[in-house]
């Protein structure tokens, strides 16, 4: 049985006719940029995210960048960011001229350790960028309290957690301005690049609406040095359809995770995902950890099971950030996660038989390891 790391068939096949109809309407209408589909999606996504405003943009990285720019963050400023996030979170900060200041994650949840944020603050700190990594909500109440105490902005990176909640409040609704990605593999994915920004501020929303469109509210009249970072009309039409199914798909991801959790408990040295108190998880990724990660991944590949590492090299060790002069060992928790984490197949449509096969092969791998270890130790 071949089991890919990700497949879109389980999501896309049932809505195929709706998607094709949306394309036909888009094609026949002849309006391709910032039209009715974008407006409709922005209204619907704002409602889903319990936010007064949603602004569609070109992708998740641009969403983060525009969020920071709208807050006036730039040269000489510092932004608190997790040490173990995907590099896009850091890149957006760097694009503004500000400096990413890494804070280690909680080793159990992989989200930023709120107890370590205070020690990273300086007189130049302007914002905290919590990342709801792998699909689990961060401890947003504590983060918002810290931000209020120290007069800081909060920009949520919600790219992996659409629909997750903390204390019954949805991610993407806590911060001053928040960014998400609709890259095809996300829980809510477009059929290409797309992203969005949510905010409760009328002023910030109006500025971002202009910034994404050459700094203009009125054609040929430019208020800011803006950018071409608009959500594509066609992608908005597709996202409008898929948004209606997101909650169901997230429930299915939780069902799959429950099976994995039950059947992989106490297998080898596996460390399974842990959801924090008051947080929910939408399992954009199902991430296990093991000291035998590389050999397990190879074994799964040899048995036609896909897996990926999220992420093999933390940002502080990337060549792109050598100018910050970090070295190996500076952020040991991020490095430990990078060296031991493995993402298993997780997508709506993953069948029970497929899940059981993944589990069977993982158990077989550890059983063989145990047998071989016993043989060598007896010699």
Image (cartoon, rainbow, N blue to C red):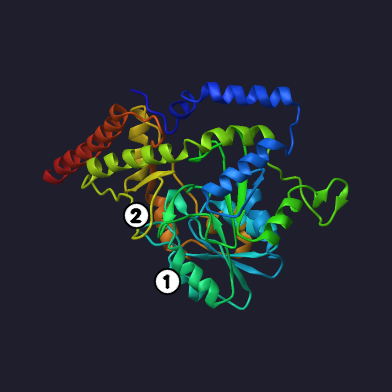
Place of residue 190 in the rendered image (x, y in percent of width and height, measured from the top left):
57, 35
Quarter of the picture holding the C terminus: top left
Calculate the distance from the C-alpha at mark 1 to the C-alpha at mark 2. 17 Å
Q: Position of residue 232 (x, y in %)?
A: 68, 37
Q: In the image, is 249 to the left or to the right of 360?
A: right
The quarter in which the N terminus is drawn is top left
| Number of marks in picture | 2
Residue at 27% in and 39% down: 259
Residue at 62 percent of width and 38 percent of height: 193
Looking at this view, is 3 or 217 the one in front?
Answer: 217
Residue 278 percent coordinates (x, y): 36, 60
Q: Considering only vertical position in the picture, is 184 above or below 144? A: above
* Local crowd size for mark 2, using a 10 Å CA cut-off: few (<14), some (14–19), many (≥20): some
Asked whether 345 or 42 is in front, the reply is 42
Image quarter of residue 167: bottom left
Element under label 1?
A: helix
Q: Nearer the viewer, residue 39 or 377?
A: 39
Instruction: Tell me the SS state at disc 2.
Output: loop
Above-or-below relation of 271 to 125: above
**Residue 16: image location, x then y, percent:** 52, 23
Q: Is residue 163 above or below residue 69?
A: above
Instruction: Specify the quadrant of the image occupied by residue 336.
Output: bottom left
The residue under label 2 is: 275
* The disc label shown at residue 43, or none: none
Q: Which residue is mark 1?
A: 115
On the rendered structure, is 180 left or right of 268?
right
Residue closest to the far left: 378
């Amino acid at each position: 049985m071949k089991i890919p790391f990700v497949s879109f068939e389980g999501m896309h096949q049932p809505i195929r006719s709706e998607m094709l109809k949306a394309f036909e309407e888009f094609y026949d209408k002849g309006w391709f940029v910032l039209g009715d589909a974008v407006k409709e999606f922005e209204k619907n996504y704002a409602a889903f995210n319990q936010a007064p405003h949603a602004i569609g943009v070109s992708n998740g990285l641009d969403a983060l960048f525009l969020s920071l720019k709208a807050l006036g963050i730039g040269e000489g400023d510092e932004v608190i960011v997790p040490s173990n996030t995907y590099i896009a979170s850091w890149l957006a900060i760097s694009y503004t001229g500000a400096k990413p200041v890494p804070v280690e994650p909680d080793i159990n949840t992989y989200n930023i350790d709120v107890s370590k944020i205070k020690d990273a603050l300086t007189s130049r700190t302007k914002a905290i960028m919590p990342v709801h990594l792998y699909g689990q909500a961060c401890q947003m109440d504590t983060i918002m309290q810290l931000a209020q105490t120290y007069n800081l902005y909060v920009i949520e990176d919600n790219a992996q957690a659409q629909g997750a909640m903390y204390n019954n409040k949805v991610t993407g609704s806590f911060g001053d301005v928040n960014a998400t990605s609709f890259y095809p593999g996300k829980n809510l994915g477009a059929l290409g690049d797309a992203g969005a920004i949510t905010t409760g501020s009328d002023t910030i929303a109006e500025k971002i609406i202009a910034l994404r469109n050459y700094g203009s509210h009125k054609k040929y009249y430019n208020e800011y040095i803006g950018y071409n970072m608009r959500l594509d009309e066609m992608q908005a039409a597709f996202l409008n359809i898929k948004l209606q199914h997101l909650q169901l798909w997230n429930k299915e991801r939780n069902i799959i995770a429950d099976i994995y959790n039950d059947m992989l408990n106490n297998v080898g040295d596996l460390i399974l995902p842990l959801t924090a108190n008051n947080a929910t998880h939408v399992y954009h990724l199902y991430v296990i950890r093991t000291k035998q990660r590389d050999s397990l991944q190879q074994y799964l590949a040899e048995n036609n099971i896909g897996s990926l590492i999220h992420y093999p090299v933390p940002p502080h060790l990337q060549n792109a950030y050598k100018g910050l002069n970090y070295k190996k060992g500076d952020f040991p928790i991020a490095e430990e996660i990078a060296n031991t984490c493995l993402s298993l197949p997780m997508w709506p449509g993953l069948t029970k038989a497929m899940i059981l096969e993944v589990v069977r092969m993982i158990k077989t791998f550890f059983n063989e390891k145990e047998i071989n270890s016993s043989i060598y130790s007896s010699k």
